[in-house]
Image (spheres, helix red, strand yellow):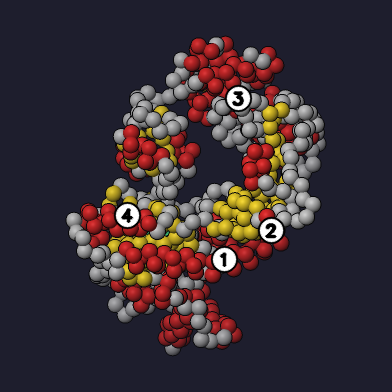
Amino acid sequence: MSKKRHEELKKILSEHDYNYHVLDKPVITDFEYDQLYTELLKIEKTESGLDLSDSPSQRVGGAPLGAFEKVAHRLPMLSLANSYSPEDISEFDERVKKFLKTDKDIEYFAEPKFDGLSMELVYENGSLVRAITRGDGSVGEDVTQNIRTIKSIPLKLKTAKPPELLEVRGEVLMFKADFAKLNEVQQENGQQTFANPRNAAAGTVRQLDSKIASSRPLKFFAYALGAVSGVDFKSQADIGKYFESVGLPTAQAQKADAVRVCKDASDAIDYYHFIEKQRPQLPFDIDGIVIKANSLRVQDDLGLVARSPRWATAAKFKPEQSQTVVENIVVQVGRTGALTPVAIMKPVRVGGVTVTNATLHNQEEIDRKDIRVGDTVVIQRAGDVIPEIVEVILTKRPKHSEPFVIPSKCPACGTKVHKLEGEVVTRCTNPLCIAIVKEALKHFVARRAMNLDKIGDRLIETLVDEKLVTKFSDLYRLKKDDLLELDRQGDKSVENIIKSIETSKNTTLARLIFGLGIRFVGEQTAKHVADHFVTVDNFLKAGEEDLLQIPEIGPKVAKAILEWTSNPKLVKEVHDLISLGVKVQTPQRSTTGKLAGMSFLITGTLPVKRDDAKDFIEKNGGKILGSVSSKLNFLVVGDDPGSKVEKAQSLGVTIISWDDLQGMV
Ligand code: IVH
């Protein structure tokens, strides 16, 4: 009897979940819902042998996981070609027609491009069995525990005849209002706040503790298929309708005109403008639209190029702009002594994040835009790009405002600052300037440099303020007792710091050279230099000619290195590091790897971290170049690539994807 009631309650509750979370149209009160839910829980507590797999009680999260399991996708999760203007939609349409050798109009299915993270839901015989992140497109992570907590995702498909297999692809995201609430609570509880709804959603999906995930309101929108068996579709529009019919959340279920079947490209361009207008009012962030050939047969004919379908494209929106007020302009001193003016603004949301700071770069830039304290300004932000002030609204300028001038004395040490001939940057040239010393030390300890991973920016500030450290070598002179005297350092953390200092002593010449922070010597240049000179002594003794033998090094970089290595104080620092135990291993560049003798450059966003991609190339013997030139063999292209692609094409450089690259190895 109660078993039957249990089945009934599951059905009723899932219907109400659908009305509430997908359609946003609840038909019963929260109180009524709670009563039904309590009844369900009561039965589950007393009865055995019930099917709990699709019970709403399973949405509250389970025991925390140690790690996510890696799972291969049955079919790869592809990426999309991007463009930024509606005209590109016409170009896409022309490409499609040319490929199909037709001049008939192509029907397109257009929908919002959700700004979240892509996810694959696997339904077997109608039951949700797994949820997998995109990962690198081939292998993702099993995040089923967390995804189950998303109330709009059905645990069981609403159909009498569920297909054997249905892989549903879509986007997990957080609504703007939920994001704002979450950040408020996080702030109050002294916990980390998130920069934007996408980060909040991603952070939640990657929570090992699904109880935390369940407390955060995520949403899901379905938009594509993975592998399927037992059901057939003719068009993209069909797929959407089917998703809707089986209870999966879609954009069109919320609002019928959120998606559109377009009879041709110009219809799709109309849709682009239509959605762009609605963008600010939408409850969630989108960053453009996606256009797909509607007919699946046409999609099939068009096929793929690299890891992107030829039958779809994304047309992104121009960056969002907002207005705010510049409350102050402060001047920061960087590692090279460069003074950077930064506008501190009244917090404002733009392009999906709350913005308070914007760099003003230098005096020339300030003069050109005539930015003053008190000004109302237009700011914009595109994708992950740092926000910028576009212009000042002069009509709103307060009376008696004054142009901002970078001070003639360093704000950190008071020394007179300089502006070199031909440079736009003003610099503090006092090598003992406390701000420069701090920044130099932060760079030295960084992960990609000497990797003293337990020493963060805050600790560096304290160590310098307490005069425990004034130069690199002092880090290796730190004693346990010195650290214990600092505020907030317990036994355990001091032990960890000392350990990380010890571990960092085993390093490479490239890391050391990079860590020294010589001007113009970034990580790649440091590697080239290290490869060439092999030992510390060779490097310190190198003259201009020796340096210029390295193909990647020009006169400017050589001069900067020589300036450094001819300063006896700095050279002594290196010797001190070595006598304090720093051991420099001989660089090991694989000359036998699969990529030996080939050069690479990366552009756009890859499915893995850029540093990891570089490591991968170098571990396999490949070389990373700094720019596109005829010397370049391969350009590795990710999402949202920049102008490098065009340049590479014009030079005949081979263009490959991350997957292609892995294939080569
Ligand atoms: S279709 C490749 N439709 O965009 C075709 N993707 O660059 C399958 N995305 O990783 C994707 N909204 O996360 C499709 N309405 C939409 C989308 C969408 C957002 C994301 C998706 C994918 C990326 C492609």
Mark 2 or 1, closer to the camera: 2
| Image location (x, y in percent) of residue 406 | 73, 38
* Upstream in sequence: badge 1 or badge 4: 4
Residue at left 33%, top 52%? 308
Near mark 3 (Cα within 10 A), the count class, few <14, some 14-19 or many ≥20, is many
- Does the image show residue 390? yes
**Badge 2 element:** helix
Spatial CA distance of label 4 from label 2 is 40 Å
Q: Secondary structure at mark 3?
A: loop
Which residue, given by chain and number where applicable, does mark 3 sit on? 518
Amino acid of disc 2: Thr
Query: In this figure, which residue is indicated by the disc labeled 2?
Result: 395
Residues at marks 1 and 4 touching, judged by CB atoms closer than 8 Å: no
Q: Is residue 447 above or below residue 581?
A: below
Residue located beneath label 1 in the image: 176
Query: Helix or strand or loop: what does disc 4 sit on?
Result: helix
What is the residue that sits farthest to the bottom in this orientation?
1
Give residue 339's position: percent from left, percent from top: 69, 35
Q: Which residue is label 4 attached to? A: 91
- Residue 143 can be seen, yes or no: no
Q: Position of residue 232 (x, y in %)?
A: 24, 70
Q: What is the spatial separation of the Cα atoms under label 4 and label 3, in whole angstroms?
A: 46 Å
- First of labels 4, 2 by sequence position: 4
Q: CA distance from mark 1 to mark 3?
A: 43 Å
556, above or below 166, in the image: above
Q: Amino acid at mark 4?
A: Glu
Residue type pointed to by label 3: Ile
